Image (cartoon, rainbow, N blue to C red):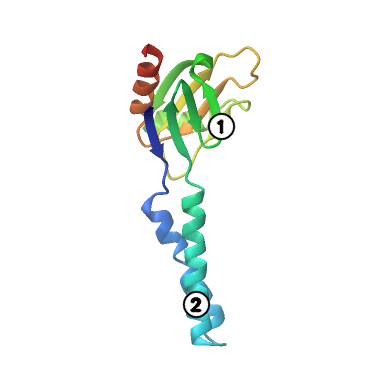
Amino acid sequence: MTDYRERVWPAPWVYLATALVIPASLLVFLPINLLAGAITAVVLYGGCLALLAYGAPVLRIEEGVLTAGRARLPLTAVGEVTAYEGEEATLERGRRLDARAWLLIRGWVSPVVKVEVVDPEDPTPYWLVSTRRPHDIVAAVEAARRA
């Protein structure tokens, strides 16, 4: 049973910004051939969309494991989980950031959760993960620990 699941999709402005590949490819190929320019523009934009979808990480809590992207952390190795939004999230991603931390952050998602790692064998002090629902992750970790 999955206690929590979120796919961190890019913000709408990212899709709009990548759409600039359409006029760029048309600018290059229109002097050669209109059809080639149109096909290239559609294929390149489709490729950009596919890469954005493939690169959108999934955050999941199930069966006593926190999964962020391809990384997995058993909840037995999780200490305090803290949600940050706004200016506090900016500070966590910047001035307060420990160079040893494991990061799964996306520039288009401001809120983050900080997951303390209490495993003495792991040199990573904490995970910092971008999420649109930081308080839901904190609640899901607490609920999974109680279960």
In the rendered structure, the answer to whether residue 66 lies left or right of residue 143 reads right
Quarter of the image with the N terminus in it: top left
Answer with mark 1 or mark 2, whichever residue precedes in sequence.
2
Is residue 125 shown above or below 130?
Answer: above
Relative image position of residue 95 (x, y in whole percent): 53, 29
Q: Where's residue 20, x and y in %?
A: 46, 67
Horizontal side of residue 99 vs 95, given as left or right: right
Q: Quadrant of the C terminus?
A: top left
Label 2 Cα crowd, 10 Å radius (few <14 / some 14-19 / many 20+): some
Q: Residue at x 42, y 58 (%)?
A: 15
Find the distance from the CA under tag 1 to the CA under tag 2. Answer: 38 Å
State the residue in front, 25 or 54: 54
Q: Where 89 sits versus 56, above or below?
A: above
Residue corresponding to mark 1: 71
| Residue at 44% over, 34% down | 59
Secondary structure state at the residue bearing disc 1: strand
Q: Position of residue 121 (x, y in %)?
A: 66, 15
Q: Is residue 96 visible?
A: no
Residue at (49% x, 57% y) in the render: 50
Labelled pair 1, 2 in contact (Cβ < 8 Å): no
Residue 25 visible? The answer is yes
Q: Amino acid at mark 2?
A: Ile
At label 1, counting other C-alpha atoms closer than 10 Å, the crowd grade (few under 14, some 14-19, many 20 or more) is few
Write down the residue under mark 2.
39
